[in-house]
Each structure stands twice: as C-alpha cells, then as structure tokens.
Image: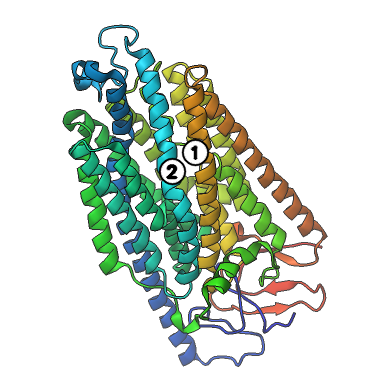
C-alpha cells in the first residue's frame, strides 16, 4: 500500500486519497507551506472547530428538550397503561380505588396485602402483552425505515435522520394523549406505534445523534468520550425531568403530564427544523441507487474494510455483541415490576429512585469514562459496563425487598453507554462518508433484536408473573452474559492479532495530537503503517 492511498485523520480514521478541506492531510512528498499558508490553515482550523462546537451545542440542546418531553410523557404513559388495564380487570371496583392509583398502585390501602391481587396479576399480564403489540407495530416498520434513512443520510444529509424520528414521536404521543384524554379504545395506540415505526423510532434518533457527533468531532478530541458525553447530556435532561414528573403525576394524574410531554416534543421538533445544520459535505457524495445503498449498509460484514488497520471479522464480532446485548434491552416491564407486589412503588418513588440513580450515572459517566481511558481502552470499558448490567439484572431477578432494588440501581453507576462506545469503535473503522450507512446497520441490528426479544421477554413476563416474576430479569442477565463473553473473545482476538502483526495499531483511547504534522507514510522496514499526526500507536512486533 502506498503512502498516497490512506491518511489517518484526527479521530484515528483512514481517509482516502481524495481529501477535503476538513482533513488537512499532507504527505511527506507535499511541498512545505510558507508561513502565510500555514497561518491560513490554522485560521481555517479554528473556524472549523468553532462551527463544530456550535453544531454540537445545538444538537445537544434540541435533543435534550426532546428527551425532556419524552421523559414526562414516557413516565406517565408507562404507569397509565398498567392502571388502564387494572381498570378493566377490576371493573366496577376500580371507581373505589382510582384515587389511590398514583400513590398506591397495588390498592392496598391500610391492608398488608391488596384484596385485588389476583385481578392485578391479570392486569400486569395484559399490560405486558399489550407492550408486545406496541413494540411489534413500531419496530417491524422501523427495521426497513432505518435501512432507507441510512442510505439517504450519506446522500441527502444528516438533518433527515433527526427530523423523521422526531416527527414520528410527536404524532405517536399525540395519538396516545387523545386516547387517554377521551378514554378511547386503547388499541388506537397501535396506530401511533406504527407511525413512529415508519419514522425510524428511537433507533433512528440515536443513529442521528451519534453520526452527527462523529461528523463534528474536532481535532484532538476523543470521539468515544464525546459520544458518551452527548448521551450523558441527554440522560441528564431525561432524569432531571423524571425527578419532578413523579410528583406531577401524583398531583395531576397521568393525562396532563403526558400532554405536557407532548408540548416539549413539539418544541424540539420545531427547533430541529430551524436550527440543526447540515454536516454532510455534499460535494464529496457519490450518488447511489437504493439497492447499492442497501448493499453498502450490510457490506461492512461481508467485505474487507478500506481501513487497513481492521478486518471484516471485527465488524462481525462487534455486530454480534450489539445483537446479543440488544436482545436484553427490548423489555418494557421494569415499571410494571416495581408498581406491583411486593414493592408497590407509587409515581413519586418511581420518579425519585429512577431519576436519582439515573442522574448520578449521567453526571458521572463522562468523568468515569475519562478516568478509565487512562488505564484501559474502549473495548475494556464496554466489557466493564456489560458486567455492571449483568449484576443489575440478576439483582432484580432475585429481589424481594426494596434494599435489593436500591443495590441493583447503585451498580448501574458503572454502566456506561455500551452501544455508544461500540459505535465509536466502529466509526473509526470507516470513511466519514460511510458513517451514515454504518450507523444504519447498527440501528437495523438494534431494531431487529428489540422487536424479537422485546416481544419475547414481555410475553415471558406475562406467562410467569404469577410463578416467578423475576424470571425475565434472570433470562436478561444470562443474555447480557453472552454478550460480555463475545466481547471478551473479541478483546483476546485483537490482542493476539496485535502481538503477531508487524503493523502499528491504533489505540484511540490513548490519543495524543501534534497540530503541526499530519502525514502518514508506510514503513519500508515493517510494512506497517506509521502515523505522524501525533496519535499514540502501539508498536507491535
């Protein structure tokens, strides 16, 4: 491989020989710039960095408002749907206990055990099965939508993958609010679920957030840290709102908090239309048909990458990690689990506990990520996060007392965003104009696993809630253990490859930058790739 074919950019990516203005690449054969030209490049660098920081600030603000709206809406909806089915199960008795639903969802009153325990078990099962239908209606169409969004985001632009899921979420929430407000047939909610599926659902939303972060990573910045930071800021907005939503629900019931969330979702959608700037350099776009675009989405797992530092097998193994981990993340039973016997958590406690531990995790995650980067790479951090997930799910599986639930939540302090870290690892393996397709492939994997496993786990909970309500969490723990094992195998394989390879392999977690030299050349002695932008490489012989 000649030195003109690949240039490693500031994020550890390999750029092709057709370089754009943002890459600022030089080879050792390039003429030396005079002081005026060098000053112009530095000015352009500063202006480019300012624009990228502005883009990130806009994106985080708008996505934060969207998450704020979803936090209020989602907290109220997840409790309301259980109470709605409890109303059907209790029949005429519901009117006697309706005023207790937000504070005492088990309707125990002054008794040690609810007199409606058997009816509420039926309500749990019905709510879990309804969750199966809402997931299938949303996730099956989104499987195909995310493929198309991935194809067109690398051709039309990034704004598309922000606007589509925000619009779908807005319409879905409006339909649900109408059903709750006017006491319509609950199955009308499935129409909204289908619409958000057509818009790409949350898989498209996070695909947009991560590809936008990758596009706006400035020189000298660690991409995985920025992705974790972006997700942490969204989580902070989500959990801060959740803290207040519990009291709001207790004071006003379920419907008006849902309507308030709808208003915030509308605001974020309008802001997205007017303030999210396009980051795709359309002058570098190669127009492709839909079939060729679809092939580009899945080609990562069947063809050797253009980046010579990585292998096709790397995409396959990391794709399997996402697939197996995603199989554990599709369940929507936690709220129902905590609202029922023996915990009987009301809206305020649900809001306080979820927000307190979630907010602590969001605020600590960026600092913890930076600290861990001093002693380990991204792959090891992802493995540590998976171990925290495993501990959390097994504690839930065997919990009978509140202190066990608190311990399970405390363990999540070490649960960094696994999928964000893996996305960052994958994004370093491809060219910038392939990131939309790459993240679309991740979104497709997530959507497929959420649809299958989410439906399966909800149905498992509905079938076993009377015998062992924690069985579903036990199964989830086993699934995540499999994902951790796959990642552990990947780490071993990568370590052995580096030990045998004469190449210099990127260790993105230990990047150091030199603003003056950016060239890359091929070493005639080792046949490996020597990078001169200041990235610390592990030299393996």
As drawn, 20 above or below 73: below
Q: Which of the image's four quarters has the N terminus?
A: bottom right
Callout 2 crowding tier (Cα within 10 Å): few <14, some 14–19, many ≥20: many
Name the mark on residue 277. none
Callout 1 crowding tier (Cα within 10 Å): few <14, some 14–19, many ≥20: many
Of residues 31 and 471, the one nearer the viewer is 471
Where is residue 59 shown, x and y percent of the image? 35, 61
Residue 371 showing in the rendered view? no
As drawn, 209 above or below 88: below
Where is residue 265 shown, x and y percent of the image? 26, 52
As drawn, 127 above or below 43: above
Q: Name the residue located 54 percent from the left edge and 24 percent from the top edge.
A: 471
Q: Which of the image's four quarters has the C terminus?
A: bottom right
Q: Name the residue located 51 percent from the left edge and 61 percent from the top edge.
A: 440
For label 2, the residue is 135
The quadrant where residue 475 appears: top right
Of residues 189 and 510, the one nearer the viewer is 189
Mark 1 or mark 2: name the one nearer the start of the chain.
2
Please say if the residues under marks 1 and 2 sit with CB atoms less than 8 Å apart.
yes
Where is residue 72 shown, x and y percent of the image? 27, 41
Name the mark on residue 455. 1
Q: Name the residue located 24 percent from the left edge and 45 percent from the top edge.
A: 261
Q: Is 435 positioned to the left or the right of 46 in the image?
A: right
Q: How far apart are marks 1 and 2 (CA)?
A: 7 Å
Residue 82 showing in the rendered view? yes
SS category of the residue bearing label 1: helix
Q: Looking at this rendering, what residue extends furthest in the top direction?
A: 111
Where is residue 198 shown, x and y percent of the image? 40, 57
SS category of the residue bearing label 2: helix
Q: Name the residue located 32 percent from the left edge and 39 percent from the top edge.
A: 187
């Amino acid at each position: 491989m000649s030195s003109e074919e690949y240039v490693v950019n500031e994020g550890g990516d390999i750029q092709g020989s057709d370089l754009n203005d943002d890459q600022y690449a030089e080879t050792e054969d390039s003429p030396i710039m005079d002081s005026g030209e060098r000053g112009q490049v530095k000015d352009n660098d500063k202006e480019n960095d300012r624009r990228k920081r502005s883009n990130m600030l806009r994106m985080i603000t708008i996505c934060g408002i969207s998450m704020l709206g979803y936090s209020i809406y989602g907290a109220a909806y997840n409790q309301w749907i259980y109470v709605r089915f409890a109303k059907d199960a209790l029949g005429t008795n519901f009117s006697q206990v309706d005023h207790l639903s937000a504070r005492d969802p088990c309707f125990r009153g002054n008794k040690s055990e609810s007199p409606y325990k058997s009816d509420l078990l039926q309500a749990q099962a019905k709510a879990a099965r309804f969750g199966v239908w809402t997931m299938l209606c949303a996730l099956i169409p989104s499987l195909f939508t995310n493929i198309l969004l991935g194809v067109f985001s690398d051709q039309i632009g990034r704004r598309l993958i922000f606007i589509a899921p925000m619009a779908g979420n807005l319409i879905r929430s409006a339909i649900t609010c109408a059903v709750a407000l006017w006491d319509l047939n609950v199955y009308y909610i499935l129409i909204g679920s289908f619409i958000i599926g057509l818009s790409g659902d949350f898989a498209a939303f996070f695909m947009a957030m991560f590809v936008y972060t990758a596009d706006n990573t400035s020189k000298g910045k660690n991409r995985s840290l920025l992705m974790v930071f972006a997700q942490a800021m969204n989580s902070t907005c989500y959990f801060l709102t959740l803290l207040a939503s519990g009291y709001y629900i207790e004071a006003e019931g379920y419907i008006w908090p849902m309507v308030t969330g709808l208003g915030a979702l509308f605001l974020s959608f309008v802001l997205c239309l007017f303030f999210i700037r396009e980051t795709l350099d359309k002058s570098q776009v190669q127009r492709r048909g839909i079939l060729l675009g679809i092939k580009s989405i899945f080609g990562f797992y069947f063809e050797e990458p253009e980046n010579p530092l990585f292998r096709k097998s790397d995409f396959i193994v990391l794709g399997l990690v996402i697939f197996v981990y995603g199989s554990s993340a599709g369940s929507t039973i936690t709220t129902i689990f905590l609202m029922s016997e023996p915990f009987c958590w009301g809206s305020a406690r649900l809001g306080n506990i979820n927000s307190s531990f979630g907010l602590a995790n969001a605020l600590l995650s960026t600092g913890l990520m930076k600290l861990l980067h001093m002693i380990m790479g991204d792959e090891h951090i992802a493995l540590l996060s998976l171990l925290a997930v495993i501990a959390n799910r097994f504690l839930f599986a065997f919990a009978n007392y509140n202190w066990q639930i608190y311990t399970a939540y405390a363990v999540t302090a070490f649960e960094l965003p696994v999928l964000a870290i893996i996305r960052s690892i994958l994004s370093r393996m491809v060219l910038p104009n392939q990131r939309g397709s790459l993240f679309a492939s991740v979104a497709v994997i997530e959507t497929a696993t959420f649809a299958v496993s989410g439906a399966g786990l909800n149905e498992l909970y509905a079938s076993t809630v009377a015998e062992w309500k924690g069985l579903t969490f036990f199964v989830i723990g086993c699934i995540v253990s499999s994902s951790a094992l796959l990642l552990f195998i990947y780490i071993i394989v990568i370590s052995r490859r580096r030990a045998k390879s004469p190449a210099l392999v990127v260790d993105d977690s230990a990047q150091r930058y030199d603003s003056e030299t950016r060239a890359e050349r091929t070493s005639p002695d080792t046949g490996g790739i020597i990078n001169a932008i200041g990235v610390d490489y592990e030299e393996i012989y």
